[in-house]
Amino acid sequence: MAATLTDFLFPSLSIRHTFPAKSSLSSSKPCRILITTSSSSRRRSILRCSIAKDISPSSTKIHQSSDGDGDGSILDCVVVGAGISGLCIAQALATKHAEIARNVIVTETRDRVGGNIITFEKDGFLWEEGPNSFQPSDPMLTTVVDCGLKDDLVFGDPNAPRFVLWNGKLRPVPSKPMDLPFFDLMSFSGKLRAGFGAFGLRPPPPGHEESVEEFVRRNLGSEVFERLIEPFCSGVYAGDPAKLSMKAAFGRVWNLEQNGGSIIGGAIKAFQDRKKNPKPSRDPRLPTPKGQTICSFKKGLSMLPEALSKRLGGKVKLSWKLLSVKKLDRGYTLTYETPEGLISVQTKSIILTVPSHVASSLLRPLSMHFQSSITLQLQQSPFLIQRKQFGRNA
Ligand SMILES: Cc1cc2nc3c(=O)[nH]c(=O)nc-3n(C[C@H](O)[C@H](O)[C@H](O)COP(=O)(O)OP(=O)(O)OC[C@H]3O[C@@H](n4cnc5c(N)ncnc54)[C@H](O)[C@@H]3O)c2cc1C
């Protein structure tokens, strides 16, 4: 097996924390739309979703739910989009929130689940068209174990070095504190600037929401930004660090300065807090990753959405494209284009996990304000992936 993907284009591509699976559903509000748009999706929104304006009621079938024990015509919740977000949410509803969301379906416009997650296998090669790894956080590992994929997990080597191409040479990125004095990606003065800044000898926060670039240049200096953070940001977000919010993109690091007055001060405080309030004991079923690493599955990432979908069974409706959302007194009517023609569904609540430009079009008839705030605030980056394949002994 051999697979070499974006790592060649983005040598610093590593940890990503973008599986935004939200699982809350309030029983006190009968009508509710929760949106988890794929703002991290790297496809540019060239095409806009079209909305059928005149859907003739006579040609539209009414979907009758066969799951759960509702009255069969009004669902508790419809999850729109069967990417990783939609599937994780549906699984959480079906397991942890079954008492308030018994009647749930997941609808997907394509004829397969997974959204951005697309794994291919051919001629002995396995490659990913979208994401290629994830960070093994406990919530992710719990999902994996619940889906029966524990034995299929593959962890990356935590000691494998990462490199940044700087001044014509591939230079290793420090992976442990002992590397810091010796790595040649930064100059001596750049390291000093970063060290003093990390201990708090740097300008104070400006009082407005800082971009990643502003925060890093102010706290750690320009060399850290240009040689470490900028390549990392393009690998993880394919975004412009001058526009990405530090608080949103790297909230944990942002919090260190907020809580401790400096990055090091915050790290010490976080360490003390952890000692005072030890974490509850870990689920013994979960594997323990060695060091800072990322992981995937033996047959690629698409094993996860496929396993989630299998568990959800008939709740997943493929080739169902949501065309419109109409507000009722209590709930919503959703109209779908399906292989069986137009189908309409009534539901008490909706969870949209579609890309932001699709959500924006779908919500336009409900609220111009909502629609424009999604369109204006969530930008998507153009993105090109180049793939190279090498045999095992290359
Ligand atoms: C090239 C690339 C590389 C990436 N690398 C990584 C990585 O290594 N690690 C990582 O953690 N993250 C990575 N990401 C980010 C990660 O892939 C996304 O955060 C994640 O897949 C988003 O999942 P989602 O379910 O929110 O959205 P999506 O995967 O976009 O799913 C949305 C679903 O909604 C469906 N849909 C759209 N319109 C409709 C409609 N009208 N009706 C019904 N369904 C509809 C779509 O078909 C799709 O299946 C990468 C992203 C890209 C593009």
Image (cartoon, rainbow, N blue to C red):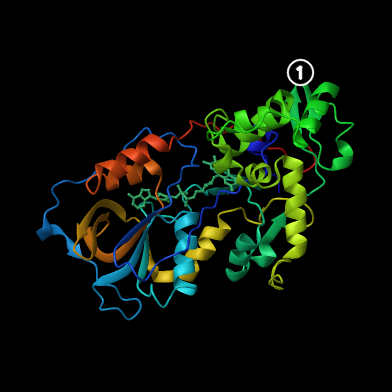
Residue 170 visible to an observer of this rendering? yes
Q: Residue furthest top?
A: 167
**Relative to 152, residue 193 above or below:** above
Q: Residue furthest bottom?
A: 69
Residue bearing the label numbered 1: 167
The three-letter code of the residue at mark 1 reads: Asn
Residue 49 visible to an observer of this rendering? no
Task: Please give the name of the residue rendered at 89% of the width and 40% of the height, measured from the top-left corner.
Answer: 178
Image coordinates of residue 33 in percent, x first then y, are 34, 57
Image coordinates of residue 386 in percent, x first then y, are 59, 32
Image coordinates of residue 233 in percent, x first then y, are 62, 34
User: For this view, does 382 lie left or right of residue 106?
Assistant: right
Q: Quadrant of residue 318?
A: bottom left
User: For this view, does 368 lie left or right of residue 22?
Assistant: left
**Relative to 159, residue 57 above or below:** below
Location of the C terminus by quadrant is: top right
Q: How many marks?
A: 1
Q: Quadrant of residue 331?
A: bottom left
Q: Residues within 10 Å of mark 1 (few under 14, many from 20)?
A: few
**Relative to 290, residue 63 above or below:** below
Circle 1 SS class = loop
**Relative to 247, residue 93 above or below:** below
Task: Please give the name of the residue rendered at 25% of the width and 42% of the height, measured from the top-left corner.
Answer: 368
Task: Please give the name of the residue rendered at 63% of the width and 56% of the height, measured from the top-left corner.
Answer: 299
Image coordinates of residue 34 in percent, x first then y, are 38, 56
User: For this view, does 132 lie left or right of residue 313?
Assistant: right
**Quick one: 335 or 173, which is closer to the camera?**
173
